[in-house]
Image: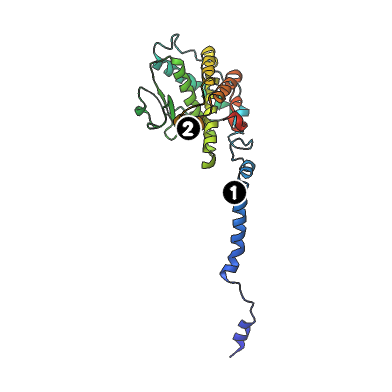
Amino acid sequence: MNGARDGEAWEPRRPGVIRRVLPTVLAFAVILGGMAYFSGDLQDLLGTAPGSPRSAAATHGLYEETGPIDARCDTLPDDVDADPAASLRALSTCLDRMWAATLAQADLDYERPREVRLIAARDKAACGIDDYDWAGIYCPERRVVNVLIEDWHAFPMMFTLAHEYAHHVQEISGIADQRGSEVFDEAWSRRLELQADCLAAVTLRSSWPNQLENFRRLAGGQSDTTGEQESGYLQSHGSGASSAAWMLRGGQAGTVAACNTWGAPANQVS
């Protein structure tokens, strides 16, 4: 009668549930704490922090596998100010050609924007209707380029179009996929926007070198002492000095590689 009970009595006791899971919980807590404490170093090690030379955006094939962009645009009218909308449509065709040829060098397929909207009011845009007072905006989900047509000289609108096209290229090539956490969203945004400024200069350097240089100097001379709304714009787009510096690099080199903001030090994308 007591054989079975005697056998059970000699079995070693199993630890309780708390004793079994406590070491695992403690180890997990230590790991999380270390990740929080060394988050910057860990992000850099993994290549996820903005400015990490190991990040996918900083090591993208477009930098090494493409040469100078053929930035000619022979279809632009002689007087681009006479009909800015017609000038922008002609430039759009040239940008499609430029980027298709450039991405092909890296064995990437180019896709045109699904729509290029030249609009007279911001409420006609495909996105960003309530956003900051913009001259152009790219809608990545719908892949629509929007440019506000204003009663002004055509070149600023041409630069805006080239800038939004650069966002399109960032999207379809995968560069824009390398988003960080909310902790450094603004740093990510500045690198994205300053790269678009640089790439816009690359594509406009041949047809409009003088206008590009004047535009760059104007951007560099803008004061960074602003109100709250403008301060938010600077945080997400970078300073006028940084914008001018990246435009200069793009205009002089004429390559995508010159516009690698993702591997640049933080003080160059401020």
Q: Position of residue 150 (x, y in %)?
A: 39, 18
At 38% across and 16% down in the image, what residue appears? 151
When asked about the image quadrant of residue 228, the answer is top left
Percent of width and height locating residue 46: 62, 43
Q: Residues within 10 Å of mark 2 (few under 14, many from 20)?
A: some
Assess whether mark 2 and mark 1 are in contact (beta carbons under 8 angstroms): no
Residue 122 rendering spot, x and y as whole percentages: 37, 27
Q: Quadrant of residue 130?
A: top left
- Please tell me which residue is depicted at 61% across the width and 25% down the height of the picture: 258
Q: Amino acid at mark 1?
A: Ala
Q: What secondary structure is marked by label 2?
A: helix
- Which quadrant, please, contains the N terminus? bottom right
> To which residue does mark 2 refer?
232
Q: Secondary structure at mark 1?
A: helix
How far across and how far down the image is residue 41, in percent? 64, 43
Q: Is residue 174 visible?
A: no
**Residue 160 visible in the shown view:** yes
Mark 1 lies on residue:
36
- Identify the amino acid type marked 2: Gly
